[in-house]
């Protein structure tokens, strides 16, 4: 009887210890390890915007085309800008002619200074000065007309892939209004949104494994940077510039998420990175890291 | 670490999916162990079920992480 009691006590105690250890192990695995399912493939998007307005006369690229920096994307109707250039040329010529004549008059006045009164000489000099300014002005106008004409050819500002491009010849573009998006492929990266409780276990330079949703193969990268701030959802500015702090305080609080930027080191063959794709990110441990911040080495 | 499992298009947390499988395994183990009358060695047989469930959960989560990528790669 006593022996049976002893066995029962020992085995139950053993079970308790095993259960406690497993609970801790599972807790670390699912709650502490710096991993997240909430990640995205991100890239800088250039909003390609024309600098001059006009009809599109030719479109040189199509949707989803890969383009190089400086490559002509489309051309805006040049007629108006060519006319403006001709006008600027003519204006410059006329000012130059007027200046040449004023110079001749001025030289003559100076040569005959004993016969010509001082007022006439001064007026002649003034005219030369004014016309020199007018020529400079006309030259600037000519440069502007040349710039406007050059800007009718819309060029790729960076290497990338054209996205959401539906423009056709005949469409009208307004200067300063975005025409389409260009995904800057050099800036492709992974943004992992980690709960704030896991941030202490993440260091700049840590290796990271990234898996895209439903895609076999692991993308290798490293932590490039961690966001310096996120919005405080409980604080607003009111109309009179005073702070408005939300009075509610929930008992069940969700950890906020902080973006961690993962630079991509190596992408397996056949995996295509598309800005916006969902990704899971796991930050790998580095040697010498405090054990309590990390999972057990299983 | 694999974080999610695709079940007919819906992605669920792998931890949850593994926990469900561990629960089913625990039920089976419970029936088998009951037949073997193993509960006579414990004061609280439910503690054995709990420990089994946790062991299955933990063990499966490691096995899935180790072997699932190899399976997919093939």
Image (cartoon, rainbow, N blue to C red):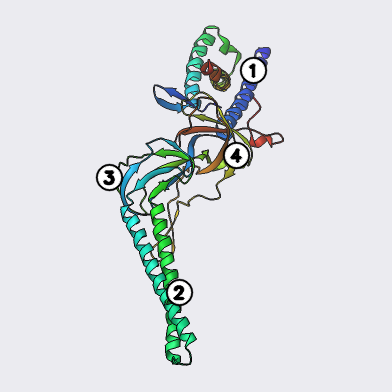
Vertical placement of residue A191 versus A237, above or below: above
The residue identified by callout 3 is: A170
**Mark 1 vs 3, N-terminal side:** 1
Vertical placement of residue A215 versus A141, above or below: above
Seen at 40% across and 64% down, the residue is A141
Residue A277 on image: x %, y %? 45, 34
Query: Do the dots labelled 1 and 4 sit on one chain?
Result: yes
The residue identified by callout 2 is: A132
Query: Do the dots labelled 1 and 2 sit on one chain?
Result: yes
Q: Secondary structure at mark 2?
A: helix
* Label 1 neighbour load within 10 Å: few <14, some 14-19, many 20+: some
Mark 1–mark 2 CB contact (< 8 Å): no
Along the line of sight, which residue is nearer the eye, A120 or A230?
A120
Q: Secondary structure at mark 3?
A: loop
Mark 2–mark 4 CB contact (< 8 Å): no
Residue A159 on image: x %, y %? 49, 41
Horizontally, is A160 left or right of A80 in the view? Answer: right
Q: Please state the chain letter of the residue tagged with numbered disc 4 in the rendered image.
A: A
Residue B39 on image: x %, y %? 56, 13
Q: Give the distance between the C-alpha atoms of the residues marked 1 and 3, in whole angstroms.
A: 84 Å
Quarter of the rendering containing residue A142: bottom left
The answer to whether residue B14 is seen in the rendering is yes
The residue identified by callout 1 is: A11
| Mark 1 or 4, closer to the camera | 4
């Amino acid at each position: 009887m006593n022996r049976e009691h002893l066995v029962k006590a020992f085995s139950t105690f053993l079970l308790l210890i095993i259960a406690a250890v497993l609970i801790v192990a599972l807790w670390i695995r699912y709650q502490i390890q710096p991993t997240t399912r909430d990640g995205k493939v991100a890239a800088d998007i250039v909003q390609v915007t024309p600098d001059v307005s006009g009809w599109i006369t030719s479109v040189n690229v199509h949707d989803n085309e890969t383009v190089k920096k400086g490559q002509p994307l489309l051309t805006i109707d040049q007629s108006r800008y060519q006319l403006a250039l001709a006008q600027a040329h003519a204006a410059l010529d006329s000012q130059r002619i007027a200046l040449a004549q004023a110079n001749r008059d001025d030289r003559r006045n100076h040569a005959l200074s004993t016969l010509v009164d001082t007022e006439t000489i001064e007026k002649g000099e003034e005219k030369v000065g004014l016309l020199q300014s007018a020529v400079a002005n006309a030259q600037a106008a000519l440069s502007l007309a040349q710039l406007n004409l050059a800007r009718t050819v819309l060029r790729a500002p960076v290497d990338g892939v054209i996205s959401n491009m539906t423009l056709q010849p005949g469409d009208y573009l307004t200067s300063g209004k975005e025409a389409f998006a260009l995904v800057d492929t050099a800036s492709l990266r992974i943004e992992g949104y980690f709960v704030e409780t896991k941030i202490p276990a993440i260091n700049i330079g840590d290796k990271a494994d990234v898996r895209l949703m439903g895609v076999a193969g692991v993308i290798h990268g490293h932590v490039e940077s961690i966001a310096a701030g996120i919005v405080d959802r409980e604080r607003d500015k009111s109309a009179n510039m005073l702070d408005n702090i939300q009075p509610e305080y929930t008992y069940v609080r969700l950890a906020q998420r902080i973006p961690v930027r993962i630079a991509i080191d190596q992408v397996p063959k056949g995996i295509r990175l598309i800005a916006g794709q969902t990704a899971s990110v796991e930050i790998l441990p580095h040697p010498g890291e405090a054990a309590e911040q990390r999972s057990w080495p299983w | 670490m694999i974080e999610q499992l695709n079940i007919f298009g819906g992605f669920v947390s792998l931890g949850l999916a593994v926990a469900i499988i561990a629960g089913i395994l625990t039920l089976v183990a419970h029936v088998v162990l009951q037949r073997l009358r193993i509960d006579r060695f414990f004061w609280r047989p439910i503690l054995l079920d709990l420990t089994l469930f946790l062991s299955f959960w933990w063990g499966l989560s490691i096995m899935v992480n180790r072997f699932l990528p190899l399976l997919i790669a093939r």
